[in-house]
Amino acid sequence: MRVERFLRDSARRFPAKEALVAGGRRLTFAEVDAMSDSLAATLVARGAGRGDRVIIFMDNCWEAVVAVFATLKAGCVFSPINPTTKADKLAYVINNCRAVAVVTQDRLAPVAAAAAAQAPSVRFAVATGDADVGALPTTRFPAAIAGGTAPATRGISIDLAMLVYTSGSTGQPKGVMMTHQNIVAAATSITTYLENTPDDIILNVLPISFDYGLYQVLMAAKIGATLVLEKSFAFPAAILDRVRAEKVTGLPLVPTMAAMILQMKDLVPGDLPSLRYLTNTAAALPPAHILRLRELFPHATVFSMYGLTECKRCTYLPPAELDRRPGSVGIAIPDTEAYVVDDAGNRTAPGVIGELVIRGPHVMKGYWENPEATDRALKPGPFAWEKVLYTGDLFRTDAEGFLYFVGRKDDIIKSRGEKVAPKEVEAVLYTLPGIREAAVIGIPDPILGAALKAVIALEPGSAMSAQDVIRHCAKNLESFMVPGMVEFRAELPKTDTGKISRRLVAEEDAARLVAAE
């Protein structure tokens, strides 16, 4: 099965049902299907061929959803790019995958034009308004979606469907190659354990350039659910008003969004009765936040999950286990195997920390034209015919096989000769009322190797002191895990996907030290 079938099948089953609510537009499945047919015909007419890459450089708008399905219907590969991306990085991505076209919107046209000027592979652009994309032949979106005939099906399920570029902590971003088969497997597995139905109404504020946000688009189309697409979570009260107005049943979160919701003083338990479920991934939710979310939304089931771009989703915690194992990210998602190995590749015993390995039909095909990075991530599995994904994340299991995230391999801090997982310290920090955001970093120290520093953003009105933080940690952690330094900031730096970035916290800390010298 190919991914464009998600939309085609839902349009056949529910032609008049609302598929998409975005930017003041309310579009049915039949309308989105017809628009994407026309845009696919436009792409083919302009010279996009089977397997060609098309850049979708847009924010969360209805046109971006149409562009995703149109690219697939044209037999091409889509690459969604965050709208905050600067011209040089965009040019790198375009050149790396040798994209033939850019689909963008007026306000982003100057950036797209500057990038395309550095990328000889790009032959044309499609833009939502009147702006030209530099010197590129530019087709206006209204004309591109008006009445074209869908091209014949071009390709099969093992063809490449998308390239998602990971931001990466160092070096240039890498293009994660996902086939139609990979996407169908991931979407089927996730919608199975979420028990999604056509009656669901899903509100997504996450960028569709981020795979967590993108899959809300794909999964809603697959099951025939309605997707309410918003641009950001900058104004939480307005988003929750939208939840009420649209009778939203599913709300995907990341930890920073959960923290913002929990700061809202006017929310009372049961305030959003339509919510059936909340999901979280990108980074683990602190158990204290899970507890408070469950109290605030008693009718909603909370799904704590773990995943990475290279396979979309790895694990989920069955909601019935939340009380018993609030710190766990659960078990492998359906039709997947997840296990922990030591440095020699042998499976570890319960309680022993090692690297998480994933087997499954959703594991990427590799990094685009980067065999060295691919070989580091995809290694021989337990059977001769397969490669499995080494995630680079440290985990342990309990006696019953439930998984617990410990930290990134490259996040581990060596202090006093002991290995410290920042996440473990952060989980304790989040149990202290008044802490809104927290990151633990290592500061070079000639005696300790690295000294632990907690960088914290407090909830409004909190009068917490550094000694309060240190005493709390001393009560709940081994001595070598207690931060010796505490710094308070208004907020912590985050990645494009809204996840607190320890790397950026550490870089800011180092820059301040240099400035003070």
Image (cartoon, rainbow, N blue to C red):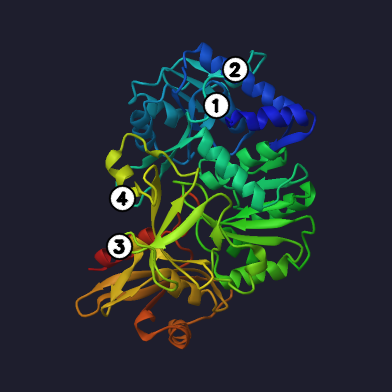
Q: Amino acid at mark 3?
A: Asp
What kind of element bears circle 1?
helix
Residue that badge 4 annotates: 170
x, y percent for residue 342: 34, 64
Q: Amino acid at mark 1?
A: Leu
| Residue 214 shows in the view | no
What kind of element bears circle 4?
loop
Crowding around mark 2 (Cα neighbors within 10 Å: few <14, some 14 to 19, many 20+) is: many
x, y percent for residue 136: 43, 17
Residue that badge 2 annotates: 144
Residue occupying image coordinates x 63% and y 69%: 322
Q: Amino acid at mark 2?
A: Ala
N-terminal of the two: label 4 or label 3?
4
* Distance between mark 4 and mark 3 Cα atoms: 23 Å
Marks 4/1 in contact by CB < 8 Å: the verdict is no
Nearest to the eye among marks 4 and 3: give it: 3
Q: Amino acid at mark 4?
A: Thr
Residue that badge 1 annotates: 72
